[in-house]
Amino acid sequence: MLPAPLFILCPGRSFSSVVCSMLGEHPELYGLPEVNLFIADTVGELLDMVDHPGQRNMRHGILRVLAELDHGEQTDQTIEAAFAWLEERRAMGTRDLYYHVCERAAPRRVVDKSPPHGRPENLKRLFQAFPQARFLHLGRHPRTSGISTFKAKQNKTRIASTNPGEVQRRWDALHQGILDFAARLPPGQLMYLQGEMLLENPDPFLRQIADWLGVSADPEAIEAMKHPEASPYARPGPDQARGGNNRGFLENPALRIGPIKPSSLNGPLEWMPDGSGFGQTTYLLARRLGYR
């Protein structure tokens, strides 16, 4: 009888850290960092997938969640205890691990923002585990999303050979996959929202989301959601699990309300060395998502 989670579906660099943390401050909701549980079937497969240089940060979120929910704090010791707990349960299904997280967070409903969950194979696992879940499809203009993504990849790899065309292809693939998934859901199970609109004027959209989820939309709940910095995951974690959310958000998690500089689907892209613009696929998909 656990409350079904709310899954935020979007590519990375789509305001998901701040939006998930905002919603998670509602007194009836609990926002998670990126736990990435449904990229694998078992805990052992998950640990093996992320046990590579450059991938270990993908386990930071679930370690922080287990430390917080099972031990009441995030310290080097509780992170080590969480990792040992996972290692002892390598045969456990990731679905059962997610149930454990939901049980520990109850009666609050879990809100999840793991970007890899938007891939078709991971959506299948997720939906099989929680067929009654709600889904928030979160948009961001492909230009500003692309600029942020390309800069992050260059900073992460510290090489100039980051494939600029891949930025556009990933945005296309994730959003198209989410739209295909949404087409199979009954009305009311998924909501689409442009992240820019929420951040420019949060109150009406927060009330709309609360009504949709069936949780309180009173002024106190709306005000609480405008303080994502209150989340236990809105700051860097201990040395062994510092991440779980966007680095920029962790450095400055306070909500910054106000107009967002408009972007255009036309013209050369800042990250394309040949000065090319969006391809037809991206252009039409972005128009479908309400961008111009």
Image (cartoon, helix red, strand yellow):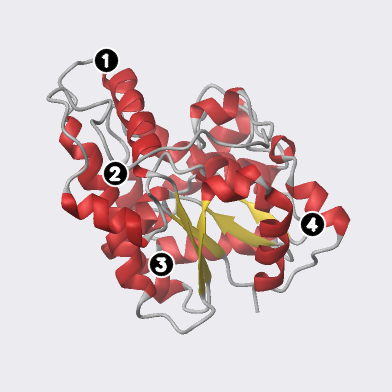
Q: From the viewer's perspective, is 265 left or right of 207?
A: left
- Please tell me which of labels 1 and 2 falls first in the chain: 2
Graded by Cα atoms within 10 Å as few (under 14), some (14 to 19) or many (20 or more), the crowding at tag 3 reads many
Question: Helix or strand or loop: what does disc 4 sit on?
Answer: loop
Q: Secondary structure at mark 3?
A: helix
Kind of residue indicated by mark 1:
Arg
Q: Nearer the viewer, mark 2 or mark 3?
A: 3
Q: CA distance from mark 1 to mark 2?
A: 25 Å
Which mark is nearer the camera, 3 or 4?
Answer: 4
What amino acid type is highlighted by mark number 3?
Leu
The residue indicated by pointer 1 is 158
Residue annotated with mark 3: 126
Residue 27 is tagged as 4
Circles 4 and 2: CB atoms closer than 8 Å: no
What is the total number of numbered labels drawn onto the structure image?
4
Residue 5: in sight, yes or no? Answer: yes
Q: Residues within 10 Å of mark 4 (few under 14, many from 20)?
A: some
Q: Circle 2 sits on which residue?
A: 48
Inspect the image, locate mark 2, and give the three-letter code of the amino acid beneath it.
Asp
Residue 4 x/y as whole percent: 59, 72
As drawn, is 262 to the left or to the right of 50? right
Task: Give the mark nearest the N terminus, 2 or 3.
Answer: 2
Query: Percent x, y for residue 3?
Result: 65, 72
